[in-house]
Amino acid sequence: MGMGRPREFDADVALDQAMEVFWRHGYEGATIAQLTEAMGINPPSLYACFGNKEGLLKAALDRYTKLRGAWMDEVVAAPTAREVAARMLMGIAEKQTDPANPPGCLLVQGGIACGTGSENVPFELAARRAQNEDQLRDRFIRAKAEGDLKPTSDPAALARYVSAVSVGMGVMASSGADREALRQVADVAVQAVEAQSTDRAS
Amino acid sequence: MGMGRPREFDADVALDQAMEVFWRHGYEGATIAQLTEAMGINPPSLYACFGNKEGLLKAALDRYTKLRGAWMDEVVAAPTAREVAARMLMGIAEKQTDPANPPGCLLVQGGIACGTGSENVPFELAARRAQNEDQLRDRFIRAKAEGDLKPTSDPAALARYVSAVSVGMGVMASSGADREALRQVADVAVQAVEAQSTDRAS
DNA sequence: CCAGATATGTAGTGTTCACTACAGATGTGG
DNA sequence: CCACATCTGTAGTGAACACTACATATCTGG
């Protein structure tokens, strides 16, 4: 029994192109024709490899979060909660206005509200955003235990806050806000985390 | 020359129903069939009254911002910048989890990314969000002039920040965050505005 | 070189979409 | 009661959609 004809395209390269299309047009706004053209393949190859349109989105999301995982690790490796928030939000200001990608964040642009039949697309995106929030929360729990955050602070609320600001910045970026505007937002936002921090010399 | 047969439905009532459909499914996810059913009319009535699907969206957005205008006036009527931000964000926590409406904000859920042919829908929504931001900015400019905000503060950046947090909270609400979770985010967010405020006894 | 297995390109499939032609209904002005 | 204008319901329109049948091509194992 042979192993069949080998695939003629690189799935990861194709996913990078698909990511861009979903990023720019959203799940429902992206058509199979646009996706296949960007990926450089024909519909049967797409369906053989990813199952269907939603399967392709999930694969693209997997790749997206995998690519961003290393960066998130750097973010939570910062020495203080304040610095974690600063790295996170300043990094987001950069990334969401990187001309190499569509503006904003795929986990938001992908689809916040969808039509009947695609209801779980928003859930899928929300779940991936929640992963980042959980990572922040765990880091802030540690910061509180270390005395870096005040005893009265709520690490889960802080993580949710930073996550909310990130999402808001992404929407702004997608509607034309430039890098400097986002940096200013990040700068203000960090001050709330600072207000929850202790005054220990760093 | 007669005036023709009178309309059998109330345009505002119909718009309220259309708003809800756009809010829940987004512009592209909402179908004419869903809209006409919710509005209790047939397609020809819809097109005669609103032109096309995009015209209906604009009319629904007009009604949405009109209904919310009174509330925004109350928000900026607060005595201090801090109180403005608190009213705004706490009010948003309430509104975006009001079971009478779909979760989140129509100006975001309506469509952040759209397919080819609907490119100006995201622009349209962004323009309406910018109106709120401008209103906040003007209020913060006044607060700075009054000595309520520090001389080093940037009213435009503060307004952009509050707007970003609002949007982020809306996305969270749409993905299931409950009222208490949003209140906590608002609570943290206000502290950044507080950090930009002077210490005058209020 | 053959059999089995998987990938590819062409050319569709049925369905759903936004939108409308048309005929009948209901109003106003004379 | 009539001419005219606007609305309403029925029943579609062509286009675009996600997805696929099928013949052909390219691999492995024997």
Image (cartoon, coloured by chain):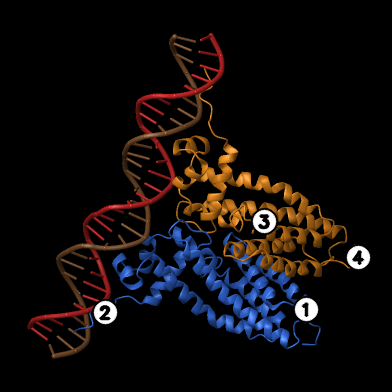
Chain colours: A blue, B orange, C red, D brown
**Residue beneath label 3, please?**
B95
> Is there CB contact under 8 Å for labels 3 and 1?
no
Residue drawn at (36%, 71%) of the image: A50
Chain at numbered mark 2 = A
Taking C14 as reference, is B64 left or right? Answer: right
Q: Which of label 2 and label 1 is nearer to you?
A: 1
How many C-alpha atoms fall within 10 Å of the one at disc 1: few (<14), some, or many (≥20)?
A: few
How much space separates mark 4 and mark 2, taking CA atoms?
73 Å
Label 3 element class: helix
- C15 and A73: which is toward the camera: C15
Residue drawn at (51%, 67%) of the image: A123
**Residue beneath label 4, please?**
B200
- Seen in the picture, residue B131 relative to C23 is either above or below; the reply is below
Chain at numbered mark 1 = A
Residue drawn at (73%, 53%) of the image: B135
The location of residue A91, given as percent across then percent down, is 62, 75
How many C-alpha atoms fall within 10 Å of the one at disc 3: few (<14), some, or many (≥20)?
A: some
Three-letter amino acid code of the residue under disc 2:
Pro
